Image: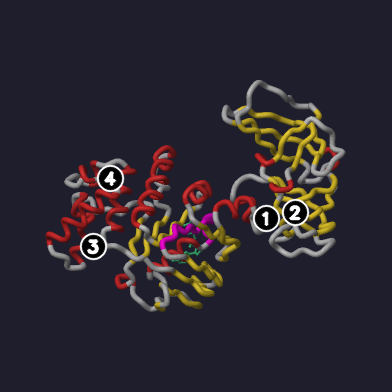
Amino acid sequence: MVSVHLEKVSKLFGTVRAVDNVSLDIKEGELFFLLGPSGCGKTTCLRIVAGFYEPDEGQLRFGTRMMNRVPPHLRNTGMVFQNYALWPHMTVFENVEYGLTLRKFSAAERRKKVMEALEIVRMTEHAHKSPNQLSGGQQQRVALARALVIEPEVLLLDEPLSNLDAKLRLEMRQEIKRIHKETHLTAIYVTHDQKEALSIADRMAVMNAGRVEQVGTPREVYRRPANRFVAEFIGETNFIPGKIGRISPMVARVETPVGPLLALRPAQTFHEGASVLCCIRPEALSFVAEHATVDNHVDAVIESVIYLGDQEQYQLHLDKAGDAEWSRVKVTVLNPGEPQRAPGQRVTLFLNPEDIAVLPATG
Ligand code: ATP
């Protein structure tokens, strides 16, 4: 187990800064996610850690060891790819054994380690099969066993679940979490799937255009996004613009066109009058009986309702927002019962201060 550090790392392809001044400190034994849209540089970061690319600028360290110039086969990293990359002419056992043969382990040691790795991924009974006799999920388990068998210091996973169907993906998420817990490995996992990252990451870095926008736990990144990009990338959200009115030790008061909104004091420093966005998730808004005479209550008209079984999704127009582009908000009601509201109806919404994240208006 080792910590992994990127210090001001950049990687250029021609004039494209695929990775742009990225600094990350990944702790020993952490399941750390690199999350972001296609082309944001997450795979390039992973390849830098694996040693397939050398950084053009900055430093990569494993613990205190400088790794920039260490070739991939001397890094002791195990990699799992999206397409499994198993050898079709070898059995499951042989696929997993291969890395040990290269490392000159004896036959007895190889057998012991392969069976242990297959045990961890629950594939022992398929050891003699060829990869094409296995389902996608089983092939990915074998690919994991192959990465684990060499007892890597760092496990690297590059979109490992993207080739699986939705149900299997959910199942394998939990499997990866379990395997990570059992092995205590430092693992770096690349994905563009927010749910995957939210559901199993210890911490994650959200990337955009080669840069890291925010590092945090799933809860921090979802509930306290650092900026608009992160808020929009990690799920649905509503934005109400305003200006900081007053900040006390606990609370920020934001003057908005729909009235003053109290929010928990943001981590960032804003001065009075600063332009901000109040970010509120659809499930954090609730319908209330009273009218908008108290703080954090706003009047709205329901425009549409979609019933989805486990939830109801509303689109509403905020009364005082006119035709501003942010005038429509989404509200999600979980576990809806009998129909209670219909399009055209006037309602009042409550915006809980604890659920409002105050973000800079730009960026
Ligand atoms: P995806 O989810 O689509 O794999 P990503 O976030 O992993 O995307 P990267 O593959 O790291 O992104 O690519 C980052 C940028 O660098 C992109 O603009 C990409 O086109 C460019 N890039 C990546 N690899 C190379 C390469 N070998 N040669 C030239 N450009 C590259």
Residue depicted at 52% across the width and 46% down the height? 195
- Answer with left or right where residue 55 lies relative to residue 303: left
Q: Secondary structure at mark 1?
A: helix
Residue 238, image x, y percentages:
70, 45
Residue depicted at 38% across the width and 54% down the height? 180
- Answer with left or right where residue 287 lies relative to residue 5: right
Please say if the residues under marks 1 and 2 sit with CB atoms less than 8 Å apart: yes
Q: Secondary structure at mark 4?
A: loop
What's the distance in space between the residues labelled 1 and 2, CA to CA? 8 Å
Above or below residue 272? Residue 263 is above
Amino acid on which disc 1 is placed? Arg
Tag 2 residue: 277
Q: Secondary structure at mark 3?
A: helix
Residue lying at the far top of the rendered structure: 338
Marking on residue 122:
4
Mark 1 vs mark 4: in front: 4
Question: Range of the magenta residues?
Answer: 29-40
Under 8 Å from ligand 1: the CB of mark 3?
Answer: no
Tag 3 residue: 99
What's the distance in space between the residues labelled 1 and 4, CA to CA? 42 Å
Residue depicted at 68% across the width and 22% down the height? 339
From the viewer's side, name the closer residue of 146 and 43. Answer: 146
Tag 1 residue: 228
Question: Can residue 89 be seen in the rendering of this structure?
Answer: no
